[in-house]
Image (spheres, rainbow, N blue to C red):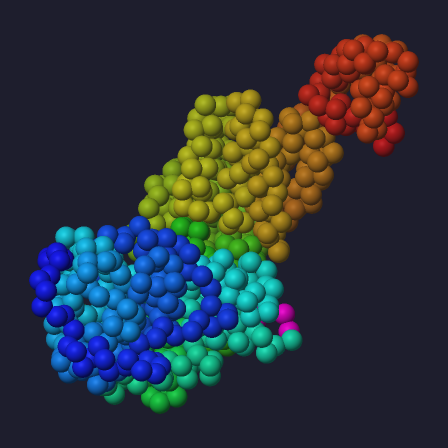
Amino acid sequence: MATAALDDEPLLPAPARLRFGVGLPEPKYQPPKECRTSVARTELLSRLQRERDRPVVLLTAPAGYGKTTLLTQWTQHSGRPCAWLTLDHADGDGSVLGNSIATALDLAGIQPGLGCSFGLVIDDAHIVPPEVLKDAVQSVLGWLPEGSQLALATRCQPSLALGRMRAQRVVAEVGSEDLAMSGAEAAALLRKAGLDPEFASAQALVQHTEGWPVALELATNAWAQRTEPLEPVAQLSGDDHLISEYFRAELLASISPAAVRFLMRSSVLERLSGPLCDEVLGRKRSAIVLAELARSNVPLVPVDPSHEWYRLHGLFREMLRTELRRSEPEIVPALHQRAGDWYRREGDIDRALDHACSAQDIDRFGELLWTNLPRYLGEGRNQMVQVWLGAVTADRVGRGAPLALAAAHSSLARGSVAVAEQWARSAAVRVAERSRGAAEQERAGVLIIEAWVARSGAAGMGELAARGYELLSEDSPWRASCCFLGGTAALLTGDQAAAERLLEEGAARGAVLAADAAALCLAQLAVLAADRHQTAIASDFAQRARSAVTDHHLTATPSTALVFAVGAAAAMEEGRIDDAKADVSQCLGLLEGFGDPLAWYAAETQILLSRTLLALGDVAGSRGLLAEASRLARRTPDAMVFARWFDDAWDRFDQRAESVLAGIALLTTAELRVLRFLPTHFSFQEIAQRLQVSSNTVKTHVHAVYRKLDASSRSEAVAHATQAGLLGG
């Protein structure tokens, strides 16, 4: 591309150079004055400084992204003379535009023929026809001296050979993502407006506005007029009158009514593509419309390299959705239904559920959620399920068996047992209204909840699980839960062979689509192996259960507490003290998540935990858990294994007491004197001062006390001594 010095032929027509020789220049030839609240775009200016060897600087973004402000700052910081030209409609004629460029250079005192470097800014370049702008740019580049730059600011992508220009490193591009403000810049904007927000508030505002400078400016104006705390304004929405008025005037006014209608109807979609818009809007060639809109003054940006998918700016989409509800409320459900059907065929169940929920198509929503619930629970995504359920009134949830069952199992997974039972009762009523064959899957869902709660004891749990298993199809992921419940019932009633068979089947069935059930089956297999003193096998099952919980993001699911109890026991057996303590803490936290504890589940988990706490030296904690487990176990009287486990636990306490008493008999008088100070906060040096001995002597006595009391820490030694009656309770 030619940038060499030109011949002596005049570059600028004489009339243009003399036109404003007297008086003030027109505003179009002057950079706008910066607003007092303008923020220095330091990072962008530094980037443009690094790219000053590129002849063209192209700023392309919709209205309100601060293109003019950045170029104003660029002219001030470039360190070279700059000419400014803001285009108007008169420049739509090529000869007039050439004359305007010549005038801008002349008024800035720039003579291109002398070879000096300079900057030429053309603002509002989208106003003139694309071909006129293209010819003007090519003409300027034909005589632009080496080291000079032409800066263009436009709301629409210009008809330039950008592919070739990028390859030749001729153009430096700045888009809407680059112009979006950061949290620090937003905070600076707010401070200039006389506000002093927390950085977190500014960051929240940036996230909500996606850094769109004009939206931040409007939010700042709104903040400045309020006396309440600033945080609520961070939720400024696209249908706020300040925002919506700006969008109508600066964005929608520049496109056709048909394009506005296209955008309004497609605003029900989070992401847009040609095929999806064709389906939802009932039209053809939407891909062409999307590509054209993305090049226009609309905040619609591609989200993939091939530009097949697009997204609207969040605030703009909110405004469009509000306009759609006002102007065409009757078509909104149909649009969501079509979108849901399209996503369902494509296998995107998350978005299919989003649209089914938005359409308030309860039957379709419930069927889709119930069918896919095992996967959501197995992937630790119950919170998303709760959000969907929260968008539907309780009355409507209870009208259909599938949705009521989804609510029941979701509630159970988060530890709300009473709520789960209530939804299961609602589902049972709806199931009874349907023919037996048509509702077998739903009937099984009710039985699984009843088996979990086990109101009829361990044997009843096994019977309910077996009935549910038979009602389900061979490939149903819910069969994994039935295997877990049936295997657990067999374990509690003493049938270890049946327990092992069912739990192994459940672990295999749930491996892919019901990881939560699979993890619980593996945990129970670890309990079985430990009961048989098969330590290595128990450890292997415990690690596999732990991995399933971690890999599928189930660590915050209350129903996985048993996995951590088993993991703590295995870690303690292998001498991994820190891991055992971490799993104990996690397990206790999950048990607290049960609003209404499942008696058999909490009893088994607490018995396992009490063993580990005793091994860790927490005698009081172990006793407390064992006492609570004993109380809960009485609700499942036919769980015969509990009696044996309790006997084993008390034997462990007796053994620990004997060990401690044997050590106590060996304590010397000097060691007993030191022991009296261990419950205090005195350091070893302070104890030595009070006993009038050396610090080394105290350390020697303390270590002897630890060894004789079978303790590994000061607190553990105090606990053992208290249990033995050597210290006050």
Q: What residue is at 47 percent from the left and 60 percent from the top?
A: 185
Q: What residue is at 64 percent from the left and 44 percent from the top?
A: 633
Q: Main secondary structure of the magenta part?
A: loop
Of the 4 image quadrants, the one containing the C terminus is top right
Question: Where is residue 89 shown, x and y percent of the image?
Answer: 23, 85
Quick check: is 423 in the magenta stretch?
Answer: no
Question: Where is residue 49 shown, x and y percent of the image?
Answer: 32, 53
Question: Where is residue 493 shown, x and y percent of the image?
Answer: 53, 40
Locate residue 473 relative to residue 273 in the image: left or right: right
Of 115 and 352, the residue lying toward us? 115
The correct choice, above or below, for 349 with respect to 99 in the image is above
The correct choice, above or below, for 457 with respect to 665 in the image is below
Is residue 701 in view from this perspective? no
The answer to which quarter of the image holds residue 623 is top right
Locate residue 137 relative to residue 213 in the image: left or right: left
Question: Where is residue 287 shown, x and y percent of the image?
Answer: 17, 71
Of 544 and 654, the residue lying toward us? 544
Q: What residue is at 46 percent from the left and 47 percent from the top?
A: 554
Of the 4 image quadrants, the one containing the N terminus is bottom left
For the magenta stretch, what is the residue range?
228-232
